Amino acid sequence: EAGVAQSPRYKIIEKRQSVAFWCNPISGHATLYWYQQILGQGPKLLIQFQNNGVVDDSQLPKDRFSAERLKGVDSTLKIQPAKLEDSAVYLCASRKPGRKWETQYFGPGTRLLVL
Amino acid sequence: KQEVTQIPAALSVPEGENLVLNCSFTDSAIYNLQWFRQDPGKGLTSLLLIQSSQREQTSGRLNASLDKSSGRSTLYIAASQPGDSATYLCAVMMDSSYKLIFGSGTRLLVRP
């Protein structure tokens, strides 16, 4: 079974530029998560999708971050405009449908550096 | 608001030692607790998941315990190996929201 795929793996941009990350979850996983992990900290949930609907985006900075999951499969996370403090690893995770307490499967992440 | 703390932040041990990583949380209304491993440049891998009604889980050389009432969990690694070098993250799943709240991790180095 293929794991969660993310691209790009690394991205360097200047502040005020825009950037987009892509995630392809494990086949059949209806729930998809985006996390932000700042260096030295644990991952923090940004947004959770159930199929193509948003379940929780309470910690997403909506003035600059947006995310979508068209057709309930792939997802993109966008930052526009980027700030220095957005430098972090962005992790995508997915979970099997049905049981909310089951483990989440994480992708390798996209490491973003904002200069 | 749930807060998860991991001590120590970093640990360096010689190969073969048994070691304990600690995790504490402030809100006992959790559904489960998980220990993850994170290697540089890679995602998180789930090691052990303990349901709130359980006291411990074991997998190979790893043993995790949970004391929900005191808000504590430990991850015990027996006979450590250089391949165990990684960052270990503790995460609690909240009872009401099923959200995962992570600690900041313990960075482990096992020296040959």
Image (cartoon, coloured by chain):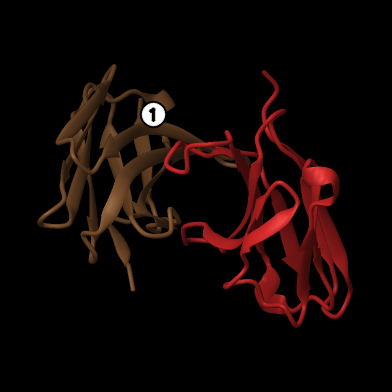
B106 versus B45 height, above or below: below
- The image shows a total of numbered marks equal to 1
Q: Name the amino acid, label 1.
A: Asp
Residue B47: which quarter of the image? top left
Q: Residue at x 43, y 59 (%)?
A: B97
Quick one: SS at disc 1? helix
Does residue A61 sit above or below B20 in this rendering? below
- Placement of A34 over or under A104, stated as above or below: below
Give the image location of residue A7, x and y in percent. 81, 44
- Looking at the picture, tell me which residue is in the foreground, A85 or B92: B92
Between A47 and A55, the residue placed more toward the observer is A55
Q: Which residue is situated farthest in the front direction here?
A: A98
Check the rendered structure and report the hue given to chain A.
red
Where does the N terminus of chain B fall, quadrant-wise? bottom left
Question: Which chain is brown in the picture?
Answer: B
Left or right of residue B20: residue B85 = right
Q: Chain of mark 1?
A: B
Residue at 29% over, 61% down: B5
Label 1 Cα neighbours within 10 Å, binned few <14 / some 14-19 / many ≥20: some
Residue located at (71% from left, 56% from top): A53
- Res. B7 visible in picture: no
